[in-house]
Image: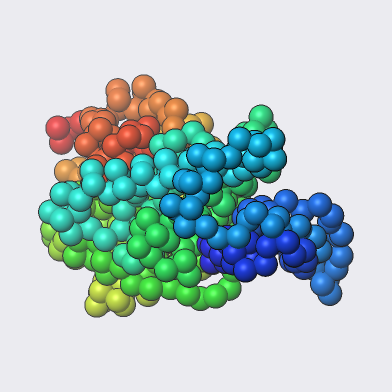
Amino acid sequence: MPELVGLYATLGEKAKALFPGWTLAMFTGNPDLGHRLGLRAHKQYALKNGPLDAKLLLMEIGADTAYKTSAQSADNHAASTSNDTLAQAAEDAPQQASSDNAQMFANRLKKNQKRLKKWLKQSGESCYRLYDADMPEFALAIDIYADRVHVQEYMPPRSVNPAQAQKRLFDALEVLPHTLEVDASRIYVKQRERQAGKSQYQKRDASGERFEVQEGPARLWVNLRDYLDTGLFLDHRPVRRLLGEMAQGKRFLNLFCYTASATVHAALGGASDSVSVDMSNTYLSWAQDNFALNGLDPSRHRVIRDDCFKWLETASTQFDLIFMDPPTFSNSKKMRDTLDIQRDHPQLVRLAMARLMPEGTLVFSNNQRRFELDSTLCEEFTVEDISAKTFDPDFQRRQNLHHVFLLRHKEAA
């Protein structure tokens, strides 16, 4: 899509420069991009291109739309007082407003780049969040993965006109390549909405287009195209770093492990062995590829496909360090029941603590924005809320994005 936004804008500029007074007919399967031409369709015909919906757009290219230099434009503007010129200015006003908004968005991206520059240089991180709905008009999350850009559009509320929301997305996509100095083919766009059950694991595409990124000492595979998520939750970067620092010589358990990036950090931090549990074969296979990428011994670092509730109830092994990052909600058919983290976290925490060595630590995190830890857990265990310490500079604007707690047995405190 980013390539198409720029292509349509270029086509419009060329048409106005080279063919003033002509009629432009465009047959397109992306009629919503038609306005990027900067021309208004006076007729539209709904047609089919095989099984695909398409439209034929007819647009008059005004004789006064030929390309002018900035000096000519200034002279014409100073001399123009006719009604025709005023009418043309009124017609161009929405396009100019769109351009102004896009420029404001580009300026915000540059401002954020400048703000993060020192931290990025010191940390060496190549994957980070550059923008997160900073401007209400552009409800996007923009993440940088080395030399590629991942754009997530937050689903607009019903009060927002869908056509206007899409227009703003196109405005953003048009300025991204130049502002971020990245080829449009390396920009990936998705719409972010609440996922439930197995839909969070379903493919959006089947490109198999993955590439390697570096996070601290860890090498990790990410895929920006095929799934809703990329394989690496960037906001949890400080938590993974903490696990690596805590893991020396310890037995490590990773529950709801996803692609096991946290296990990689723990293993590279010196964990003696590890177990990573998840229900998804897709993500467990991804985890094993991450292990192989970092030269981890599969006999010491195992993956297990199971419902974490069920596995915890039947497991007998104990661990020195446990990481548990459950989804906010899941109704996957692979589970015996639904999971609601606010409702079910007391049971989950108690099951995990039963697998924890007397001197061990459970790192419990979740992404429920309004999460409140059950007060009875504070009576049973020593609990430390470290959430405020687990946001790097790229996520400090939204410090309710996740919650992180350290839990220990009271007798060990």
Q: Position of residue 371 (x, y in %)?
A: 43, 29
Comparing 378 with 146, the one in front is 146
Total numbered labels = 0
Residue 372 at x, y percent in the picture: 40, 26
Whether 248 is drawn above or below 392: the answer is below
Horizontal side of residue 265 vs 212, given as left or right: left
- Left or right position of 330 against 42: left
Residue visible at 19% across and 65% down?
A: 217
Residue 397 on image: x %, y %: 32, 34
Q: Is residue 327 visible?
A: no
- Residue 349 placement (x, y as % from top left): 38, 38
Residue depicted at 86% across the width and 60% down the height: 46
Q: Is residue 160 left or right of residue 141?
A: right
Location of the N terminus (image quadrant):
bottom right
Q: Residue at x 55, y 55 (%)?
A: 190
Q: Residue at x 15, y 63 (%)?
A: 270
Locate residue 338: give its quadrant.
top right
Q: Is residue 64 above or below residue 50?
A: above
Q: Is residue 19 visible?
A: yes
